[in-house]
Image (cartoon, rainbow, N blue to C red):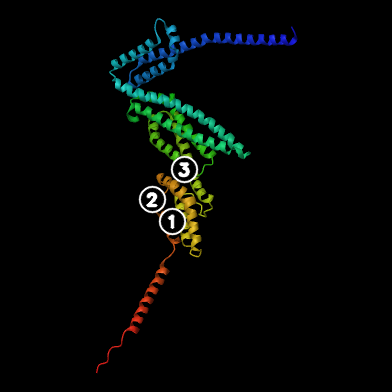
Amino acid sequence: MNKHAFRSLSQLATLVTVLLFGLACSAAAQPGSDYETVKSFQTKYKAIKEAIRQASTVQQCAEISADIDELQKEFASDTTLLNKALYPNKYDDEIDNARVDLQMTQNRLGIIESQVARITDLETQVRVLSGKVDSLSEQNDKLMASLDAVTKALERHKDVVDSLNRIISQLRKGIRERDAAIFSMVDSMFTQYGKNVQELPEQERAMLIGKMRRHNAVQAIRQAAEQNLKFLETTQLSGKDLVQMLAEQHKFMSYWQGLGPKLTSLYVNRKDQKAQIIEIDTAISQWGQKATLALWAGLYGEFAQYKVPVDSFRNADEFTTSLSNYFDTQGGDLKAPATERASRLNYFLNKVWNPSVNSEWIPMLLDRGLISQAQDNQIQNKLKAWEQATKPSYALLYVVIIIIFIAVVIFFVMKNKKMAPPYPSQN
């Protein structure tokens, strides 16, 4: 046998050995995996049975009902394994037994099934949204890290702009979905109890606080506010993108204004949670302040982008004054030829006013209460005056027409006098 053949056989033997070792490890690992699955089911099942034994409120029964649904869904693919491990019992029988025990507890407590079903639906929604919040938060953290990396790369390479825009778009979408999921989750938690927080008995208050803690509700809101602030500081949005971002920030603030007082009442005696609520207020306040500064800077950028020489502005009064003065100046510029004045107006309307400022920015400013209706009316009237001033004046033409008409009348009167026969003489 030559060296090459020997080497080939040696390599083959090595490969076979590795494969056999891998199969052996896999076979050895499988029982361990099955054992962990059975142990996990039994542990969770035992916890549910104990919770049923201790249940005393409709909210607790609803949570247990959701736990049973979750357990059944989690181990549905392991039915065969569990049937063998639980013999002579069966997996489906264990699930049914838990539901029967829960029903007996509800009957003992005098709890109506429809109440449990309604709250169970809400609890299930909370759990789904909680998972969605965690998933979106993790995704957004990765996108934020990518945004930082690409932003730094942008300083060195101009060919990453498309990648940056794509990340910004994905991150903005992820942040919007995460924010909506957080507030829907928290709202579902409060809805389960159906009362004002101040009226909740101490036991139900403690349960709601525990639910908030399990799903990291307060922390999720704080992290969302901080991430929104960082996103605003990191990205250089303009135009429609900035308008959308600011509208989302306004929606977040509106949600928090409704939720914040409820959380404050809920955690009235808990200093650690009250501190987090204060942190949320601070983060949202900073976010709002920077969003407002970004708003006015972004709006001014709409004019600067097309070199429309309006005075800079940082608030509603300055914005109204700046545009009013600009419109007055343009409308009162009678020295320029009419064609030039009309060209300037059309440029302004087609480049700045119609596609962006009047269609997107001003509605948002009105919606957020950053400008009043009276200020908007003033701006719109000033613009109409500019438009009117660029239209050709027909006053001189009217004067010329009147003069011509009078001349024609005089001409015919004089002509008729010349042609009229003299009066006959009287003898």
Which image quadrant for residue 387? bottom left
> Distance of mark 1 from mark 2, alpha carbons?
15 Å
Pinpoint residue 170: horizontal percent, then vertical percent.
51, 34
Query: Type of residue at label 1?
Result: Leu
Choose the circle earlier in sequence order: 3 or 2. 3
Q: How many marks?
A: 3
* Residue at the spot of label 1: 383
Instruction: Give the quarter of the figure containing the C terminus.
Output: bottom left
Q: Is mark 3 on a helix, strand or loop?
A: helix
Regarding residue 206, the answer to whether it shows in the image is no
Image coordinates for residue 195, horizontal then vertical, percent: 32, 29
Residue visible at 61% across and 40% down in the picture? 158
Which quarter of the rendering shows the N terminus? top right
Q: How far apart are marks 1 and 3 (CA)?
A: 23 Å
Q: Which residue extends farthest bottom?
A: 427
Residue type for callout 3: Val
x and y, in percent, of residue 270 in the image? 42, 28
SS for tag 1?
Answer: helix
Judge the density around disc 2: few (<14), some (14-19), many (≥20) Cα neighbours within 10 Å.
few
Along the viewing direction, whichever of 362 and 404 lies nearer the viewer: 404
Question: Identity of the amino acid at label 2?
Answer: Gln
**Residue at position x 35%, y 30% from top?**
197
Question: Which residue bears the numbered disc 3?
Answer: 243
Q: Residue 282: x and y, percent?
A: 47, 37
Q: Closer to us: mark 1 or mark 2?
A: 1
Q: Residues within 10 Å of mark 1 (few under 14, many from 20)?
A: many
Q: Name the residue under label 2.
A: 373
